[in-house]
Image (cartoon, helix red, strand yellow):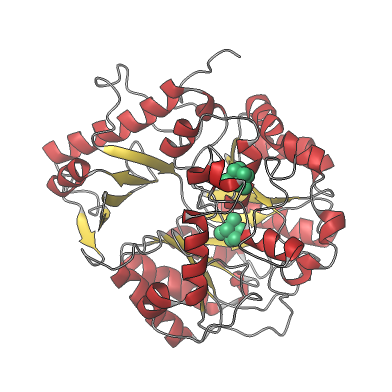
Amino acid sequence: MNEPEAPTPDRPDRPDRPDRPDGPDRPDLVRAVHLGHAPNCSATGSIVGDMLLSATATAVLINSVAVWLASRARAPSRDEPPPRLRRDRRGGVLLVPSTAPVGPARVELTERGVELALAGGASLVGRAHAPRRPPDEVHFSVTERCPVGCSHCYINATPKGRDADLDQALESLAELDAAGVHELALGGGEAGLSDATLALARDARRRGMIPNLTTSGAGLTPDLAQQLAAVVGQVNVSIDPGLRGASASDLGWRALDLLQGAGARIGVNTVLSASTWPHLDTLASKLAARGIGEWQWLRLKPSGRGKTSYLEDRLTPAQRLQVWPRLLDLERAHGLRIRIDCAMVPFLAAHQVPVESLERAGVYGCPAGDRLGSRTADGRWLPCSFAGELTDPKPTPFAEAWAGDALLNAWRSRAETPPAPCDQCAYRAVCRGGCRIVSAHLTGDPLAPDPECPLVSP
Ligand code: SF4
Ligand code: SF4
């Protein structure tokens, strides 16, 4: 296979490519770059696709960030708010604003990179010596209310579902800010139906965090679209042809119209299932025609109503093996940027995508309880938003839950010391053992190897 072109500015939101990359790749400053925002299960965080086939492309990406850091250190900007920086044991994590040529991005820095970021005016958040690295992003359910009734809804949302208490949710948000969490993924149920969504998004923005949103489009009005566009980092609209009914689909397309008209940064979420799989080409054409730059593919999860027909709805083994080649084909044919969620990293591993490229482009499988946390509408902390049926933790302060919760600790240990065959897998550090929710449903043990990984069950 020919080595593809490095990322260029004509691909939406890819970093500008310097005319002459400023010297060699700069791993002394930057460890990994997660491009884009994190509106949902996107803790893998970054561009996948052609970039991962080329060591040159990931080097250009790393170098672009290094050049931006150095230029900012020489001349700190007075026009932009200072970027948010959290220290960790290996350096730090910097939230690069969307106004920067390499933004928006979440960048893992070395100690040297941290020094440069501070010289450029970055503002330090979080505790310098926290006992455990806080998550980079937290999924924040503002309501379990939703009228759409999707058959695969992961929390059994209904029209009468409970709403989050706004005062308690704002307290939680303050805790997350103090811990140094950078991004929120606001969702539901249908977050567009809750007044808490805008209140939380505004408070997060005031704190320098990035609030993102996932919506089916229910409850979205032209006025709400305008207000969201002014405050939210990115809104992802769920469009799942074949899996949702026609009226739900109409809601999604209408939401895209409203949000695009309001100038919001938008993406589209599609759950890959046996039902949506035949529609991907048509959907890709429609998204490209509308100028939607970012398309997020999510693996179907067997939680909530999604458990009922999971065995019929999930991708077949042959389709799982087709995810990566199909993604490349659709990206190239339509100029789309396709992201995959945390649960689909095992499907890349089967194609021997270079591990180093995956690491440096910020691809990171199962971040549950590690780089990802989740808050339920009633204020409980979970390792990931799909795990509500696997545990019943009491609402406690975030710091206490994050440091001491038994489920979170068990899931972290599982990623660090996985059972066979993950223990011998070259992708272990990037994949982290596949999806616990799938393992729990299919084997009864969330800590078992992901049975749908092509390397676990060839
Ligand atoms: S358990 Fe599955 S859905 Fe949850 S963070 Fe891990 S891979 Fe993602
Ligand atoms: S064998 Fe385990 S670590 Fe390797 S790709 Fe599969 S699930 Fe991930």
Whether residue 73 is visible here, answered yes or no, is: yes
Q: Nearer the viewer, residue 362 or 74?
A: 362
Residue located 20% across and 47% down the image: 114
Is residue 44 shown left or right of residue 328?
left
Instruction: Residue at 74% x, 44% y: name it.
Output: 457
Residue at point 84% right, 60% down?
245
- Drawn side of residue 176 relative to residue 322, left or right: left
366 displayed left or right of 33: right
Viewer-proximal residue among 257 and 183:
183
Viewer-proximal residue among 335 and 5: 5
Give ligand 2's quarter of the image. top right
- In this view, the residue farthest toward the top is 2
Horizontal and vertical percent for residue 318? 81, 37
Q: Position of residue 112 (x, y in %)?
A: 18, 41
Rendering coords of residue 91 (x, y %): 24, 49
The residue located at (12%, 36%) in the rendering is 74
Judge left or right: residue 129 versus residue 65.
Answer: left
Q: Where the C terminus falls, by quadrant?
A: top right
x, y percentage for residue 26? 27, 29
- When asked about the image quadrant of residue 438, the answer is bottom right
Q: Quadrant of the N terminus?
A: top right
Instruction: Identify whether 279 is placed above or below 222.
Output: above
